[in-house]
Each structure stands twice: as C-alpha cells, then as structure tokens.
Image (cartoon, rainbow, N blue to C red):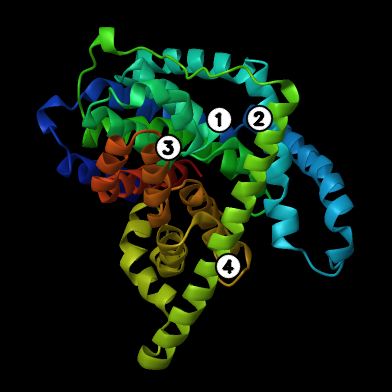
Amino acid sequence: MSYIIGIIGLFVFMGLAWIASSNRKMVKIRPIIIMLVLQLVFGYILLNTGAGNVFVGSISKGFNQLLVYAAEGITFVFGGLVNPEESTFFMNVLLPIVFISALIGILQYWRILPFLIKYIGIALSKVNGLGKLESYNAVASAVLGQSEVFISLKKQLGLLPRHRLYTLCASAMSTVSMSIVGSYMTMLEPRYVVTALVLNLFGGFIIALLINPYDVDPEQDMIEEEKGEKQSFFEMLGEYIMDGFKVAVVVAAMLIGFVALIAMINGVFDAVFGINFQELLGYVFAPFAFLMGVPWSQAIDAGSIMATKMVSNEFVAMQTLDSGVYQLSDRVTAIVSVFLVSFANFSSIGIIAGAVKGLNEKQGNTVAKFGLKLLYGATLVSFLSATIVGLLY
C-alpha cells in the first residue's frame, strides 16, 4: 500500500508543478522520465546497497575528520568557553564552516572545483533537457552556496531572460553548499544527507522542466566564469576564511531569532487555542507527508517538522528532529531528513534576491518578484526527493 501511495505522491507533486507551469505545452516528458529513473537508481544504490554504504561511509568519515581538524582551531580560540558537560551548537556545528570554507577556497584557487563543476554540468546537460548554463549552475550551487554561486555567473546575469534566471535561482534554493554539509551530518545520518544532495540535483531539473519549460539557443548557452584580478594565495585564503565565519555568524543570528520567535508564537497559540503553532502547521502539512510515504499516525508530527523548515530554516527543523521531541520510525526519519536538506524556506528568498541584486540591481528586482514561485518550486523538489526515499526505504 505504501508503494501505491508513494507513486500517487510522485504524480501529485509533479502535477502541482505542472499546474503552475508557465507553458504547459512545452513540457518535455523524456528528460523528466530519464531523471526520475536516475533518482530511483541512485537513491537505491545509496540507501540499499553495500557499495552505497561504503561510498556514504567514506564521505562521512572524510567530513568527520575535517570536523576533527576544525575542532583544533575552535578549541584553541574558544576552548575555555566550552562546557564539557554540554554540546555547544555554535562551536560544534557552525564554526567548522570556517575551516571547510577555507578548503573550498583552496580548491577554487587551484582551479580544481571550477574544472569539475563545469564539465559535470556539461555532462548533465546532455540528459536533463536544459542548457549548459543551468546545469553548471546546479552543480556550482551545491558546492559554492546559494548566494556565492552568482558571483561565478556575474557576466551572464545581466543578459539572462526571466525564465532562465528563475531556473538558476531555483537550483540555488533546492541544493545546499558543501561548506555546511558537515554541519548537517552532525544532526542527521550522513547517508540521508548524501542521498538528498543527489536526489535534489535531479529533482531540481525535473521541477524546473515542469514549472518553467523553455528551449535554449545554443549560441546563447555559454559558460563564462567571472575572472577578476588574480589574488595571492593568502589573500584568497583570508577572504574565504572570513566568508565562512560570516556564514556561521549569520546562521547563528537567524537561529537565535527564529527559535525565539517560534517559542513565543508557540506559547501564544498554546495559551489562546490550546495547541502550539508547530502542531497546527503539522495538520496543514500532514497530507503532504502522507503522500511522501509517511504513515498517517506519524504524518502530523512529520508535517510539523517540515513546516518548521519552511517558515524558519533547515537548522531549526533538524534540531527539532534530532531533539527526540517527536518519536518517528526509522523510515519516517529517513523521509523527513531528506526533505530537510535544502535551502527551501522563506528567508532564502531574501538571501537569493539580495545576492543577485548586489551584482545586478535590475535582475535582483526580477528575482524578488517571482520569489514565492521560487519557494514553491524548491519545496516541490524537497517533496519529490523525500517521496523517492519513501518508495525505496
């Protein structure tokens, strides 16, 4: 029965994208089917095979070692502040972003990441029915981040029509940057994080093909990376270290504000209506959780965590899931965990619009206008990926 519900869920979520399509007649079925098959194949390998376990285990081990190295620097600076009896979120989850950001900068400086991003993107463009620029952007977003990726496309931004700009922004919101993947792995099982990264990549293309179909003129489909004055190695390293620290501080500030606001709203709702705000949202999201493969007995709790992610951010939702407040089965935990791994939330609209506006004011205003549609599409990507996990787990 769960398989039937999951299959229905796939059609419902893709149907919701099709309903909002800008041009239903241009939707390309063949690449959608190909990428659905790829999602199922890669999802099965990562979740259910020995090879997948080895692959995920290697990635997890690598990130754990990076976190150990990061802890050396954190302990040196903040060691006297850490309470050995408690885990400090800022120290253990957010500050490692600084070290991982530095590593990304080194790989960028040595031209390793640009080479991989460019040619993986070109390979993906052969199967996804989109342009090379869109494919490049999807891979680059998963490495550089939802705001930083637009710097690498600065020269193209002013030339992009509205429909192509939407796809680029949707990719940025549907993925997560490598600089914070290690942080996610401290709260979720690594195999769910890795699985979500792969599924969201293809899911982003599927939803884009449904909600925003178009053809690309090959002559206008050039990948031209932004190249500025060559920095010295240590100039670059200092810049990426500071960027990583800024990300950690911004996320910390967002968490302080959102966690406090949710606590206040929960208190008000509980006092007035006898039900807190997150529980109320759980009822709204419960039908969608059910279509993802969550049993109805756990759908309200799962829906509450999913809604928390959308109205606040993924870190708040992951903390809620990790806290043990909701008693979810292993299968439901897998489904919800994959749903949480993306930047699909209201605050991301402002982050992406602001990043684009900083590079091109006119295009930034365009992004702000389709912000809600952007969140709608990115959320459908999360639904689609989580439903695939529900079918395979």
Q: Earlier in the sequence, mark 1 or mark 2?
A: 1
Q: Distance between the residues labelled 3 and 1?
A: 25 Å
Q: Three-letter amino acid code at disc 1? A: Ile
Q: In this view, does 50 lie above or below 348?
A: above
Which residue corresponds to mark 1? 45
Q: Which of marks 3 and 4 is nearer the N terminus?
A: 3
Which residue corresponds to mark 4? 256
Q: Where is residue 268 in the image (x, y as percent from the top left)?
A: 42, 87
Mark 4 neighbour density, 10 Å: few (under 14) some (14–19) many (20 or more): few
Residue that protrudes farthest toward the left in the picture: 25
The kind of secondary structure element at disc 3 is helix
Identify the residue at horizontal 52%, vertical 19% (top origin). Answer: 117
Q: How far apart are marks 3 and 2 (CA)?
A: 17 Å
Residue that protrudes farthest toward the front in the picture: 229
Can residue 41 be seen here? The reply is no
Q: Three-letter amino acid code at disc 4? A: Ile
Q: How far apart are marks 3 and 4 (CA)?
A: 24 Å
Whether tag 3 and tag 2 are in contact, CB under 8 A, the answer is: no
Q: Position of residue 130 (x, y in %)?
A: 30, 20
Q: Three-letter amino acid code at disc 3? A: Ala
Residue 104 is labelled as 2
Frontmost of labels 3 and 1 is 3
Q: Is residue 154 above or below residue 83?
A: above
Name the one closer to the observer, 59 or 108: 108
Which residue corresponds to mark 3? 172
